[in-house]
Amino acid sequence: MSKKYHVTTTVNGDEYEFLCEPQQTLLDILRDELTLTGTKEGCATGDCGACSVMVDGKLVCSCLVLAVETEGKTIDTIEGMAKGDELHPLQRKFLELNGLQCGICTPGILVAARALLERNPDPTETEVRYWLAGNLCRCTGYDKVIRSVLAAAHEMRGA
């Protein structure tokens, strides 16, 4: 039996404590221990972006981060994006402009898009495509995803 580690971290503004084995990923802990199932597992190798979250302000694939590494860190997931019943502008635009289909990739794309817009509130289409290149989608063809991100950016700027 592996030694378990005690970890205290902040997820979406709330403090959490959990025990984890050294090989457990942040993705496993979010889904299985903290029941935050919005973050999806697509590949488990960091290639698809479905499990994208923010750790201390940095966009990461949670399948590649060991849970023990999150001690004292701040994690933001898709569950923290809306404020109560009020959707984030990105979430609204994805719904309005059909930027999603099956939904497996959507949480990771939304987290990544929010990270982009926090750094660059007025991205070009090329910049959005480049930023989201690590998020794979088998359904949409990306066009509606890109349009949704650009529309949300426009709205968030008050333009």
Image (cartoon, helix red, strand yellow):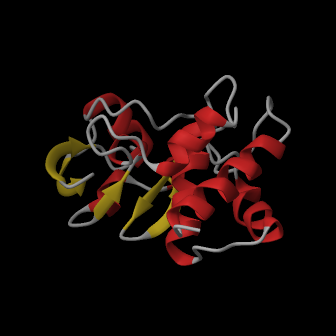
3 above or below 103? below
Choose between 92 and 34: the one closer to the eye. Answer: 92
> At x 43% / y 42%, what residue is drawn?
27
Question: How many numbered circles does the render carry?
Answer: 0
127 relative to 3 in the view: left or right: right
Quadrant location of the N terminus in the rendered image: top left
101 above or below 11? above
119 relative to 49 in the view: left or right: left
Choose between 131 and 37: the one closer to the eye. Answer: 131
Q: Position of residue 141 (x, y in %)?
A: 86, 38
* Observer able to see residue 51: no
Choose between 102 and 29: the one closer to the eye. Answer: 102
Q: Residue furthest front?
A: 159
42 above or below 128? above
58 relative to 134 in the view: left or right: left
The part of the image, by quadrant, that contains residue 98 is top right
Q: Position of residue 101 (x, y in %)?
A: 70, 25
> At x 68% / y 48%, what residue is drawn?
148
Quadrant location of the C terminus in the rendered image: bottom right
* Observer able to see residue 90: yes
Q: Position of residue 156 (x, y in %)?
A: 51, 63
Q: Residue furthest top?
A: 102
Choose between 39 and 86: the one closer to the eye. Answer: 86
The part of the image, by quadrant, that contains residue 79 is top left
